[in-house]
Image: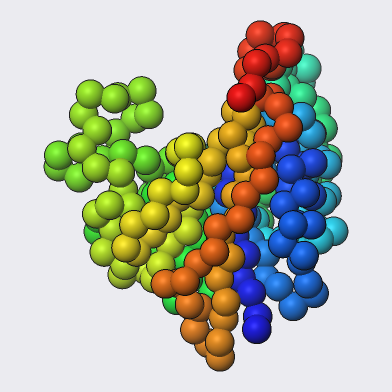
Amino acid sequence: MKRVIVYGDIHGCLEELRALREKLDIQKADIEISVGDILNKGPYLAHDMIRYMQEHHIDVVMGNNEAKALKQYRKYRKSGAAYLETLRPFEAATVLSLQEEDARFLSDLPYYTKIANLTVIHGGLVPGMRLDKMDEAQKKELTLVRYLNRDLEPIPWSDTENRYKFWTEVYDGREGFIVAGHHPFPKPKIDTYAMDIDTGCVYGGKLTAAVFTMQKKHVDTENATLVSVRAKRDYWCEYLKGEACEKD
Ligand SMILES: [Mn+2]
């Protein structure tokens, strides 16, 4: 049986991705898709992450970190090295690791991928948004949506007071069953028509894959299997502190 395998946010955690693919016993016929945010914050450079995805034919959907890296890369090419000093060290490292062909890879990333009745995006969908009719602002929103307020409008990450529902709780399934990432949860958040499988690997959590089987032209979204590997370290904590961090 053909498998469709979707990976949550990887953020440079290449060793965990390798371990997860080994655990899944990846076969040639498998379709592999990443929800995006393959780069930034973690131990492996953006260039290495992009090369790995290309070599192993893993499709990638545009994440907010890919969009940001591309923007910063272009600005750096235009305005030179002084611009790098305005960036955070991990962002500058990402920009410096990118080659022209990597930038092309990033700019070619789709904002969503559909395999029959299964859809992969990075962030979330707000009520009323249609994937085939998005302007640039909506594309950006697609990579960023997490919580909605009482009017079902997306709110910024920092606004914890007006969190009414997570987008997966109100999504009605009109764009198929959606697998997304972007907002890390201790374990995958699963609702009727969507799931968020970002389990915070770069923060010392887990890297998770949602595994679906496909028969004829239908993905069995009702029987997903979730497979995870634990992060080796809390990379983000180490980056912020500049030293090793405790991890349970
Ligand atoms: Mn993200």
Q: Does residue 153 sit above or below 233 in this rendering?
A: below
Q: Nearer the viewer, residue 86 or 12?
A: 12
The picture places residue 152, in percent across and down from the top left corner, at 20, 45
* Picture coordinates of residue 178, whole percent (x, y): 43, 62
Q: Is residue 54 left or right of residue 224?
A: right
* Residue 239 pos. (x, y %): 69, 16
Q: Residue furthest bottom?
A: 216
Is 152 left or right of 208, judged from the image as shown?
Answer: left
Residue located 39% across and 54% down the image:
190
Relative height, residue 88 to residue 212 (above, below): above
Q: Is residue 68 left or right of residue 104?
A: left
Q: Position of residue 109 (x, y in %)?
A: 63, 55
User: Depth check: 210 or 77 in front?
Assistant: 210
State how many labels appear.
0
Q: Nearer the viewer, residue 105 or 42?
A: 42
Q: Residue drawn 63% across and 44% down?
A: 207
